[in-house]
Image (spheres, helix red, strand yellow):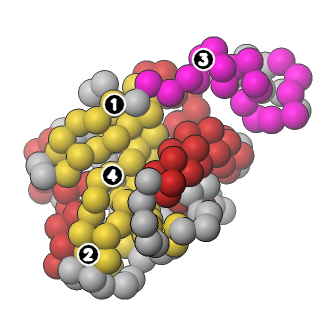
Amino acid sequence: MRCFSCGKLSWNIICQNCRQTLFRPNIKTRTVGTLDVISFYRYATLESLLLTKHKPEGYRIYKALGKMVFTPFMREFVEHDEGVVYVVGVDESVRSGYSHVAQLTHAMKMPGVTVLHNALRARKRVNYSGKSLEYRLKNPRDFVYCGKSGIDVILVDDIVTTGITLQEAQKVLLEHRVNVLFALTLADVDA
């Protein structure tokens, strides 16, 4: 197989050289409403990889990205936290044969971490790509939560642009007595 980024022969979809040189995380935290959102990359850095999310190769790319950044982050987080850590992905619905957000949350599964797969689902399939803030506000995703109540969670999504989706998800979770500690995303468009 070839590296998706540089095209050189590699056992992995993203070769070791590209991981170390091109895709070294640059962690940034920004506050959206009352929610801290931690992102590992600028959107521009990962754009070609992120755009594969509804293509067959996206499965392997999102899986690799999850292992590159979400797995080490959670290992370190669990070391400093007592008890069980819960993870909820934003709308893990299956499209094109897999869910790209589920690939990220799956990479976080380890002892001490419980991933609540498909617990937060959108009733409306709204595509926000390239849309204005006004459009996003007029067309909410209308999330439904069907997981545990009375817990603390880490919210996960692939990209943060305006933060409207994460704020809407946080609001629904709070209505179910679920406290969102913070959100993790692969990329931040504003970074």
The residue depicted at 40 percent of the width and 30 percent of the height is 27
The kind of residue on which mark 1 rests is Lys
Q: Is residue 30 visible?
A: yes
Mark 2 or mark 1: name the one nearer the start of the chain: 1
The residue depicted at 56 percent of the width and 27 percent of the height is 48
Secondary structure of residue under mark 4: strand
Q: Residue under label 4, please give it.
A: 183
Question: Around disc 1, counting alpha carbons within 10 Å, would you say few (fewer than 14), some (14 to 19), or many (20 or more)?
Answer: some
| Along the line of sight, the residue nearer the viewer: 121 or 86 | 86
Secondary structure of residue under mark 2: strand
Mark 2 or mark 3: name the one nearer the start of the chain: 3
Relative height, residue 22 to residue 172 (above, below):
above
Tell me how far mark 4 sits from mark 3, CA to CA.
24 Å
Tell me how far mark 2 sits from mark 4, CA to CA.
13 Å
Q: Residue under label 3, please give it.
A: 22
Q: Residue under label 1, please give it.
A: 28
The kind of residue on which mark 3 rests is Leu
Tell me how far mark 2 sits from mark 3, CA to CA.
37 Å
Pick the quarter of the image with the N terminus. top right
101 left or right of 13 in image: left
The residue depicted at 83 percent of the width and 18 percent of the height is 8
Tell me how far mark 2 sits from mark 1, CA to CA.
24 Å
The kind of residue on which mark 4 rests is Ala
72 left or right of 187 in image: right
7 left or right of 92 in image: right
Relative height, residue 31 to residue 166 (above, below):
above
Secondary structure of residue under mark 3: loop
The kind of residue on which mark 2 rests is Val
The part of the chain drawn in magenta is 8-26
Question: Around disc 4, counting alpha carbons within 10 Å, would you say few (fewer than 14), some (14 to 19), or many (20 or more)?
Answer: many
Question: Around disc 3, counting alpha carbons within 10 Å, would you say few (fewer than 14), some (14 to 19), or many (20 or more)?
Answer: few
Q: Are marks 4 and 3 in contact (CB under 8 Å)?
A: no
